[in-house]
Image (cartoon, coloured by chain):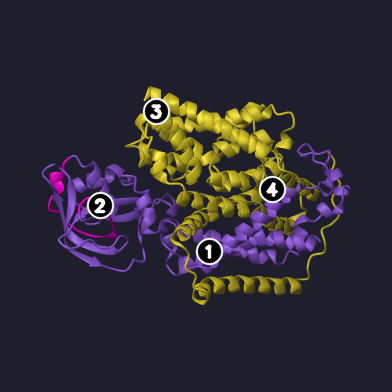
Amino acid sequence: MTRTEPPAVSARPKSGRGVAWLVIGAVVIGLLFAIDLLGPGIYPVELPTRAQDGLTLALSVLIESLPFIVLGVLLSIVVQVWVPPGVLERWMPRRAWARRAVLSLLGMVVPVCECGNVPFARGLLMRGFSVPETLTFLIAAPIVNPIVIITTHQAFGFDDGILIARLLGGYAIANLIGWLYSRHPDPDGLLTQRFRDTCDLQHAQGAAVGASGKWRRSVGQFVVELRAVLPALVIGSALAGAVQVLVPRDALLAIGSDPTLSIVAMILLAMVVSICSNVDAFFALSFASTFTPGSLVAFLLVGPLVDVKMLALMRTTFTTRVLVGLTVIVVLSAFAIGTAVNLLA
Amino acid sequence: MPERRSFVNRLLGVGLAAALAVVTLSLVATGRLGLYINPDSTWFAASMAVVVLIGAVLTFVLPLGAEDDHGHDHGAGDAHDNAAGDTHDHGSSAPAAHRRHPLAVAATVGGGVAASVIVLAALVTPPASLSAELAMSRDIDAPPLFAGADAVTLAATGDTTEFGVGEWATVFATSTNPDAYDGDPVTLTGFATPGDGSFDLTRLVITHCVIDAQAASIPISAGEAAPDTGQWVRITGTVNATADGQLSVEADSVERIDEPGDPYEY
């Protein structure tokens, strides 16, 4: 457990140079503002209607999720750099299943929605939480979360057991996935090489000494996390926007009242539309008149966990095999729970 | 070339985030954020955008490559061995020795370029609202029930002055007592889409952001010719209950207007 201190990081810039770089940074940001405000006037581009709609949709997802991503990155930095070693760990039970059970409730106190969870989960991994534990958190938090509970209750009340099925279902799926992957012989093999490199780097840097070292690491981590998450977020949002303008919605909706097909349709819809778990209950509500309750539950379970945007985000950290496994488990579980609700309701 | 790689990494991370933050703040400053997300979350979006910009300026002080000091370019040496005894080491081989699959490299490059192009498009194109075509393809003949029971309760108590197309569509679809609304005066704004009466008055209703937009529409009967599909109109008229219990709006005037600054209802 001994760790020799890494050699000191390269000499800090002299304060004069630091100020100069700050000014340059501010100028670059100013230029971005100028491009944004003047750009449309200089190059008036008229996009075809569909392309424009796709861009509008993609951009709306981006603008809406960026604040949550930033919050997630900030929390991730706090967890990695500022919370002293042992503080979080002391609160955790020792048994693996109990740790996962507690971690799947962490979403109740960490105010990030599904997109922000990804950088936060990366922070947990780098801090030393195991892969199955982190997966459990990542899957549970978008559903077992106060905002989601409130909005789902606003939308459905306790009708047809939709709220209960969603909460218990999300909790159960998360712990099922945590348990399954805890049996994996090589949990680290579940992570992408790029993420493992980042981890090694973090450990090599070790606990930074002193406040200025911590600030420095925080800024470095800001760079690293945004690099990991943002391209995935942009591409995930673009896919979500493109799919919305390309896949005709009525094709999915023609099958609403069939107990089995309706579940399949709503699962597909959930994976395609990529709506934040905070508000997807309202979206689902508008289908309540034509779709079975079980299919709505399946929609509310699948959407937050494995929609196209989340898959793109999770791909930054987990291998494709893991994502395929996750998707299969989530979809099958949601299908089973949805069917059960349809039989009981 | 660690500096060049670090530069690209920053462009794709902090750079894209900063560009999006700039787009967000410009929309807030020009009062057009409502074109993309519910204005209720303006303060959150704006404050986090400011955090991004402050962070982005701070990263300029960090020398290129400093975020991954002791990283890949030190070979299989010291740093990684140091971590080897740690409990939470992710136990990989030394990164420098790792060769990425050409397809993976292509995917990374392609993804980076695609993401940059999209963000650049966001930066240089003017903000836009969704088209009437999309609104029609979204119209699934099920009323958006956002307001749910509230709207119907409110309508029953007679307070319909604040109602938009979304609330009226809910009332029209769910009311059990249509006669109660017969004769209610309405002034509504929306765009025209083909419908059963003269035309439908349609508006997109948003809960959180444009991606959850759903079309709400109500049938309008007007004496004059229907406006073109997609034409924005302001309707003044009264609610009319037919003998078979269907509600529609009898338009006294149909005024053609430009698209309003707030094209959505929330």
Camera-side residue: A341 or B230?
Answer: B230
The chain ID associated with circle 4 is A
Measured Cα–Cα span from mark 3 to mark 2: 31 Å
Q: Nearer the viewer, mark 3 or mark 1?
A: 3
Mark 3: secondary structure? loop
Residue A291 in sight here: yes
Say which label, 1 or 2, has the lower sequence index. Answer: 1
**Mark 1 nearby-residue class (10 Å; few <14, some 14–19, many ≥20):** some
Numbered tag placed on residue B195 in the rendering: 2
Residue that protrudes farthest toward the top in the picture: A344
What kind of residue is marked 4?
A: Gln
Measured Cα–Cα span from mark 3 to mark 1: 42 Å
- Rendered shade, chain A: yellow
Residue bearing the label numbered 1: B122
Residue B193 shown in magenta: yes
Residue B103 shown in magenta: no
Residue bearing the label numbered 3: A259
- Which residue is depicted at the point 39% across and 59% down? B131
Q: Specify start and end residues of the magenta stretch as a single range.
A: B177-197
Measured Cα–Cα span from mark 3 to mark 4: 46 Å
